[in-house]
Amino acid sequence: MSIVNHDHLVSAIALLLLLSSYFENVIFLKINMYTLVYSNHIFCSAPCSPTQKPMRMRPARCIHALPVTILVSLLLVFWWAWKYDLTVVYLNGLSNSNTPETLMVDPYLVKPYWANTSFRSLPDLEQLNWPATEYSPVPVARIDKLTGSMEPHPRAFQPVFSRGQRALVSRLLALFAQVLSTNGLGDRFIINAGSLHGSLRHHDIIPYDDDVDVCMELSVLPRVIELFRAHEPDYVLYTEKRRGKLYTRQIPPELEQTDAEYSRNTSKYPWFWPAVDICYYTNNKTHVYEVGANTWRRTWLISEFYPLLFRPFGHRWYPTPFNPIQYIRTMVTQDRFCFRPGYSHVFETSLKLQATPCQNLGMRFAFVERSRVNNRSITFPPRASDHLKQLVICEERLIIQSRMNQAPTVFHTLQLPVHPDLAMLDTYDYGKNKEG
């Protein structure tokens, strides 16, 4: 998408330069005339005649108008920048000017160990511009001192996490990834379900989600349980046959009324919230299977799942399936609607399912807009398979719609190697691709 016609920028700058040049010439002329008169009076070759009156020296009036003219010119340029979003164009221009000519795929390929690998050469997501995060004004599930009741689950499409709770789930996910990736298990899990959906839609947690989701290869579960024993009692890895949870020890009673980064006892189940929700998967030579709690289980082709690719999720990179949109479509039907799920992970109870067209949220929450990049080369590792060579370069822009038909605000831009199914995905309807 073209954010602005660059002729507007050129016109604004040209006008400022023209005005500056005009007044510079006028001032130069006036000052020269002033200097000439002054020198004729002071540096006479002979004493001035008694009848000759000293000339009254008048500084050029245009000197006094100079600050006003510059101010008006700058205001004009700033107005033009606001109207046509030139700041975004300038920042994008800087970003694009630093973009290497070729995109290396290897750093995006998930490996067993992440440290001291090409993973470290991925863009620093903390340095990107991000939209302001909305938080719940009070910690959900906090116990009221007067009534003894818990703060309820927020209304649909309102943020569920308070500031401290949001920081906590981000820390829990980072810890999970660190433990696995430093022990050779970095390619044995993915961000899953709503978190994968959030990476695709927002480069972050869905603004109204209430947990973080990962899925882990079942065969490594015993090893992961052993590794997390070193983090007890501050962190608890709870595991069952078909699922798991990662959370902190219960919030101390003296901190109950605060937004401290601890999990809370919020339901009849043995785990606490906020937590990382963990599912398991198994695989064979042809398919990947979710180990579900139901009699049926979701199934993906092995070619849709592997090799795993890093994607942005907040300020960190996390593993995702090779074809993430097909993975998501297998889990949940995709169309133009955004949903508040019919289940609360806070209280482990049912909620009323709510839906709204995603585009209706476009002026409140930032969404990822995509386009395929054809003017940049892509470099694959030596001996890359034809399957891997399907990847194309996609430019993903995190945008928020503006009011009054203004151009959208672009917070940041990333160029990523993605499956072709993802490259032209419609911004607000994941059931279709954009035209053209």
Image (spheres, helix red, strand yellow):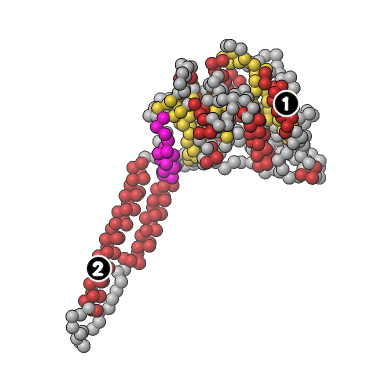
Given residues 281 and 340, the one toward you in this image is: 281
Q: CA distance from mark 2 to mark 1?
A: 86 Å
Residue 20 to residue 136: above or below: below
**Disc number placed over residue 226 in the picture, else none:** 1
Tell me where the magenta segment starts and ends, as one range.
84-102
Alpha-carbon neighbours of circle 2 within 10 Å: few (<14), some, or many (≥20)?
few
Alpha-carbon neighbours of circle 1 within 10 Å: few (<14), some, or many (≥20)?
few
Residue at x-position 64% and y-position 27%:
183
Residue 210 to residue 321: above or below: below
Check residue 100 for magenta coloring. yes
SS at mark 1? helix
Q: Report whether 17 appears left or right of 198.
A: left
Residue 206 x %, y % = 60, 33
Q: Quadrant of residue 296?
A: top right
Query: Which residue is the extreme one toward the bottom?
Result: 50
Residue 209 x %, y % = 64, 32
Residue at x-position 70% and y-position 32%:
275
Q: Report whether 87 appears left or right of 30.
A: right
Residue ID for mark 2: 32
Q: Amino acid at mark 1?
A: Glu
